[in-house]
Image (cartoon, rainbow, N blue to C red):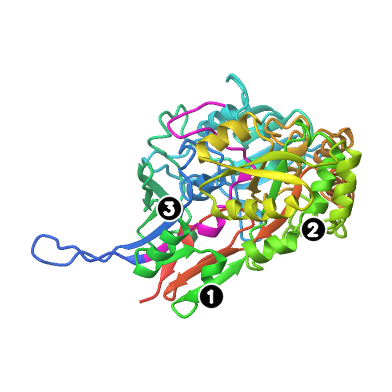
Amino acid sequence: MNKRSFKSRLAAALCPFLLMGALASCAPKNQASVPGGTPAPTQAVVRTAINAEPDSLDPFIYAAADTEAIMLNVYEGLLGFNAKGELVPGLAQKWTVSPDGLTYTFQLREGVLFHDGAPLRPEDVVWTYQKYAGIGFEKPIRSKMANIASIKADPSGITIVLKKSDTSFLTAMLSPVVRKQAVDLAQKPNGTGPFQFVSYNPSQKVVLKKHSGYWNKERMPRIDSCEFRIMTDPSSILLALKSGELDFAGVDAINAAGIKSEFDVVSVPQNMVQLLALNNSRAPFDSVKVRQAMNYAINKDEIIQSVALQYGTKLESNFSPAMAHYFAQGLDRYKPDLPKAKELLKEAGYPEGFTTTVTVPSNYKFHVDTAQVLQNQLAKAGIRLEIKQVEWGQWLDKVYSKAEYDSTIIGFTGKLDPNEVLGRYASTWPKNFIKFNNPAFDAGVKKGIELPDGPERVAIYKQLQKILVEEAASVYIMDPNLVLAFKKNLKGFTNYPVRFLDMSALYFEP
């Protein structure tokens, strides 16, 4: 994993919950005077808070969900997605797929400008996606692009040929497009989206402004600029919200009831999975009986009540019911059962239990609070859980990149295709830091990407969820809701099945 000025790259499918303290505000700045004493037009500014530093601003490097939630306002791919999670035209206005599922042809949209004023050209798309795919470069940057055999531009558009059929491939076309031979993107991002980059001050904020030359008039921003402030303390976010520094913010569930008279409070699903991830390659979690014992020893309802104040949906596998089409019902195998947990521990060779460490990113209070509840619950089964809080950068390096951990608590963001959700558990997945290894699971993942979308493919992904439960790959806790407080004149918030802070949709009433 390459390192730049911002920590390590995070997995494409990973999100450490900016959820409970995310977002922020929309408010007009004070009027400024111009020569002659005439007030300048009021600037509409949206200020938002994020819980972690961007892992980079370079689309060839970043993958943290919090970063992507910001940069989706700056960059665009050949395709986009709507609030239902459906793929829609982006920089490509239409596309076709060959009958054998190997050749994809995209007709590029005309009149698109990068933020530096340069027009979008076919060679920009070809160069960008070749770099992602590792064609002419050292190696693929994005694993879901590694299946590309060739990319070329011709009169019919951009043609991409795959090595083998992959039903989930189209989601790879959400990947940002940059100018050919673009350099220094970590310092000077240059995309085609509705907002363009202004500045980034580490530990302070990222600032974007409206892209006046944006091609999509239906998505032309109704605000002038936005700020993503880096704030890790939920209490500080709440104070900033109440003081007027922020007009729109994610809040802890425990604080939501107390501010309903001042703000519009909404709770929305996230298509996310909070889990106690177990390193399957390390003792004692290399034993399925120990992993099953962990599941029996934990009371998820208690965690949802005490940590999320019921703002969450209990999960049994690494899949949220928000993706109802592929969600497997009836997998609630592990009901709290301490005698069963102790019996399994004894069978696994741990009659007196054991001591283990859970490594938790300290900037995510939601995870820290969850760890404390788990510590008390597991102690009743003889499992002594020691909590180790680490900085986010250290978590990325030691846990995610190197799998140097026993267990951890984290949140996996939802994706638009089931393979991106479940494929992370395949033994061949580059960032399978849980180290789950199951031949039947691997075979199912392989078959799932080859089949066309239909009942057979749905059945495969439901079976994969069942395998995760039976093998107790980890402890799947909940899909926590995102609880948001809006100043009453702020409108336009749109919720998506993936992390995206769509600033172009926001506006405020007088």
In the image, 123 versus 258, the foreground residue is: 258
| Amino acid under disc 2 | His
Instruction: Say whether marks 3 and 1 touch (CB < 8 Å).
Output: no
Number of the label disc, if any, that sits on residue 257: 1
Crowding near the residue tagged with mark 2, few <14, some 14–19, many ≥20 C-alpha atoms within 10 Å: few
Q: Nearer the viewer, residue 173 or 1?
A: 1
Magenta-colored span? 1-26
Indicate the position of residue 351 as horizontal and vertical percent values. 86, 41
Which residue type carries mark 3?
A: Met
Crowd rating for badge 3 (residues with CA inside 10 Å; few <14, some 14–19, many 20+) = many
In primary-sequence order, the first of circles 2 and 1 is: 1
- Decide if residue 143 is in sight here: yes
Circle 2 sits on which residue? Answer: 325
Kindly state the secondary structure of the residue where label 2 is placed.
Answer: loop
**x, y percentage for residue 142?**
62, 32
Residue at screen point 79% across, 35% down: 284
Residue 332 is covered by the magenta coloring: no
Residue of label 3: 231
The mark that comes first in sequence, 2 or 3, is 3
- What crowding class fits label 1: few (fewer than 14 Cα within 10 Å), some (14-19), or many (20 or more)? few
Can residue 19 be found in the magenta stretch?
A: yes
Instruction: Assign a secondary structure to mark 1.
Output: helix
Residue 322: quadrant of the picture: bottom right
Q: Earlier in the sequence, mark 3 or mark 1?
A: 3
Q: Is residue 431 left or right of residue 458?
A: left
Residue 89, numbered label: none
Quarter of image, res 450: top right
On screen, residue 429 above or below 321: above
In the figure, is residue 29 to the left or right of 454?
left
Residue type pointed to by label 1: Ala
